[in-house]
Structures are given as structure tokens and as C-alpha cells.
Image (cartoon, rainbow, N blue to C red):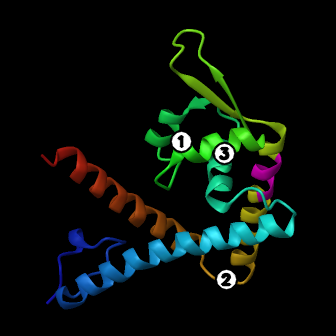
Amino acid sequence: MSLPASDALIGKEQVPVEHSKSTFLECLQLVERLHRRLLDVIKNRLDSKGWSDVNAVQALLIYNIADHEMTAGELKTRGYYLGSNVSYNLKKLVELGYVSHTRSEHDRRSVRIALTEKGIEVRNILDELYDDHLAEIVADQVIGAGELAVLRRGLRALERFWADNLRFAS
């Protein structure tokens, strides 16, 4: 027995009902494992470049701040941060000199954050890492551009589903 095509998570393929849950659960495990692997890869690159005082989660935070100036709250609501303690990591990044913070002139309770030159260097290391990996993935045909687009659509659809689920649950 198959699900209607409209119920498929990615593309138009039909998935047998008896395999749907196990496939779905495996996908969830893969997403979680991929994130952990990404953190390992980032830490490895940082260590090889002599940046041992910043961890991979903090480096991702730096990467996602990029050239934006924002509040910690904006960082979280924009979905730029994966983790449970953005305040702690931002405090550490300020102490280590990767991020600067200034109080808003209009609302003294609000603190704006931005990267320092040191933070920009770490961001550039991650940007180079992503460029290197994308080039290698394409050259080795690990995943094609079309497959990557389908994967992105599927992951975005799942993200929207869960966001809607949270928004309308109560």
C-alpha cells in the first residue's frame, strides 16, 4: 500500500506505508548526526588553523552573525542558532574578542552584537571550508545540484510543518 503522492515528503515519489515511519525516523537521525558531524568537521578545521579557543558551536554562531548587527533575541528568532545557550556562547565570544556588543541608544536594555576583526577571520575560515566542501562534493559527484535542491525543498517543508505545528498547537 502506498501514500498518495501529495503525502510524500520529498518530490513526487510514493512511499509504502509500512516503510514510511522507519524512513522518517532514519531521516531525523541522519539530520541530527549530520549536525554533529558538521560540528566535528568545523572543530577539525579550526584546530588545524590554530583557533583552539573557539568551539564549533561558537564558530557557527560567528558564521551566522556574519556582517549583520543584531540582538541576541534576533539571532535566535531568525533561526541562526542551533543550541540551547546562546547567551552563554555570546558572552564567551565577547570575552574572547570575536564579537563586540553595544547597548542600544534607544533601549538601554537591548544589546546589539557584531563581529570583530577576529570574528571575521573565523567566519572566513568557515566560508572557505564550505567552499572547499561544495567543490569537492560537486567534483566527486557525491550529490548533484538537482538532488541538493530536492533535499532543500524537503527539509524546508519539514521545517514549515514543525513550525506550523508549534504555532497552532495549544
Q: Which mark is residue 87?
A: 1
Dot 3: few (<14), some (14–19), or many (≥20) neighbours within 10 Å? some
Which circle's residue, 2 or 3, is located before the other in the chain? 3
Q: Secondary structure at mark 2?
A: loop
Q: Residue at x 85, y 70 (%)?
A: 48
Task: Give the magenta part as a residue range.
Answer: 121-125
Q: Is residue 168 above or below residue 139?
A: above
The location of residue 5, given as percent across then percent down, is 23, 74
Tag 3: amino acid: Lys
Instruction: Name the image quarter holding residue 26.
Output: bottom left
The location of residue 108, given as percent across then percent down, is 54, 14
Which circle's residue, 2 or 1, is located before the other in the chain? 1
Taking depth in this image into account, of 35 and 99 the one nearest to the observer is 99
Taking depth in this image into account, of 92 and 159 the one nearest to the observer is 92
The residues tagged by marks 1 and 3 sit, at their Cα atoms, a distance apart of 9 Å
Q: Residue at x 56, y 45 (%)?
A: 88
Q: Which mark is residue 92?
A: 3
Task: Tell me the quarter of the image containing the N terminus.
Answer: bottom left
Q: Which mark is residue 156?
A: none
Q: Secondary structure at mark 3?
A: helix
The location of residue 40, given as percent across then percent down, is 65, 73
Q: Residue at x 61, y 42 (%)?
A: 90
Tag 2: amino acid: Gln
